[in-house]
Amino acid sequence: MMRLAVLALALTATAASAGVEEAVSAHVLPATQGFADAAEALEEAADTDCTADAVRPAWNDAFDAWLGLSHLRFGPLEEDSRALTIAFWPDTRGMTPRALGGLVADEDPVIESAEGFAEVSVAARGLYAMERLLYSEDYAGYGAEDYVCGLVRAEARDLARSAALIAEDWAAFAMTVRDAGNEGNDTFLSERESRQAFYTALVTGLDFVADQRLGRPLGSFDDPRPDLAETQLSGRALRNVTLSLEALQDLAATLGSESAPETGAAFDAALGTANSVASADLSGVSDPMQRVQVEALQQEVRDIRHAVSNEIGTALGVSEGFNATDGD
């Protein structure tokens, strides 16, 4: 009996380690390379024509690609505050419009070099800053010779640089993950630590969808806040929720293999509800009938989290860890 118990534990550890390998090879590396490719295409689009209508499609593609890895808040995304530089949201103090307004008002020459722009406040860089330049009425109709056009080019160049570094660094960091627990690995002192990192990324990502992407515009029944929806200017808040859930489902599938039917069903239910929400910008939270759908979606995302804890956390031999958004 003891030998059978030891064998079962060994098989569980092997399966868990295989889940981490699958997460690296089938989830992380394709996502980071996909974002690098999309950001490079955004830079090329802005270089060709930096006006808003010309850049918006490539910006949306880059945002889509970012959602495939935005939950991986450890390793290369932690270095030099890269995740924050790429995605400064929620902006609870309205720092992005002020930072951009200052650059434009002064026609700051910092945009002329990649090195100079890398020193600019994170509030004035990344996908959300670009959204404001491309969609806000404050900058509507800027021309090819205007300072804003040059700023758009600087933003795109900066994003492409960050995305390329993340892809490059993750290709190297993958070896650190795979080498977890071996002598000389100061990042992951055991295989359990690498499993914990991925599990925490999964549950943190789900929390962010429920509490921020859905919770902020929901506000309360008496005080809904559709104006606080993510990417409110471009009207893609619901798309962000859907793509985030799809990316998290992919990560869960790599970690849970075939042993997480409850988790798979919970993801399918939430994605089905998301597809039925009428307002792409989540403005429907102000309407009682539409609000019910968004509240149901939020609860279903929380149901996913419970399923993940029961199935994947147990299988990996890990529990709740440090939340990457704690203290934000």
Image (cartoon, rainbow, N blue to C red):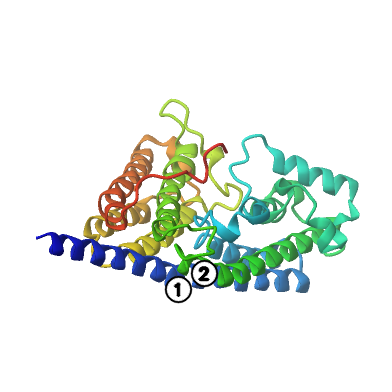
| Nearer the observer, 135 or 31 | 31
Picture layout, residue 34 above or below residue 280: below
Q: Is residue 117 left or right of residue 209?
A: right
Question: Looking at the image, which residue is at 68% across and 37% down?
Answer: 94
Are the residues flagged by discs 2 and 1 in contact, CB closer than 8 Å? yes
Q: Is residue 281 visible?
A: yes
Q: Is residue 167 left or right of residue 6?
A: right
Query: In the image, residue 319 lies at what x, y percent?
Result: 35, 47
Query: In the image, residue 212 lies at what x, y percent?
Result: 49, 42
Query: In the image, residue 43 lies at what x, y percent?
Result: 71, 69
Question: Looking at the image, which residue is at 51% across and 46% down?
Answer: 324
Count of numbered badges drawn on the protein: 2
Residue holding disc 1: 25
Location of the N terminus (image quadrant): bottom left
Q: Is residue 142 visible?
A: no
Q: Amino acid at mark 1?
A: Ser
Mark 2 surroundings: few (<14), some (14-19) or many (≥20) residues within 10 A:
some
| Nearer the observer, 106 or 120 | 120
Query: In the image, residue 301 lies at what x, y percent?
Result: 35, 47
Picture layout, residue 5 above or below residue 309: below
Residue holding disc 2: 174
Q: Is residue 200 left or right of residue 34?
A: left
How far apart marks 2 and 1 lie (CA) works out to 8 Å
- Secondary structure, mark 2, is helix
Location of the C terminus (image quadrant): top right
Question: Looking at the image, which residue is at 44% across and 43% down?
Answer: 214
Q: Is residue 132 left or right of residue 225?
A: right
Q: Amino acid at mark 2?
A: Ala
Mark 2 or mark 1, earlier in chain: 1
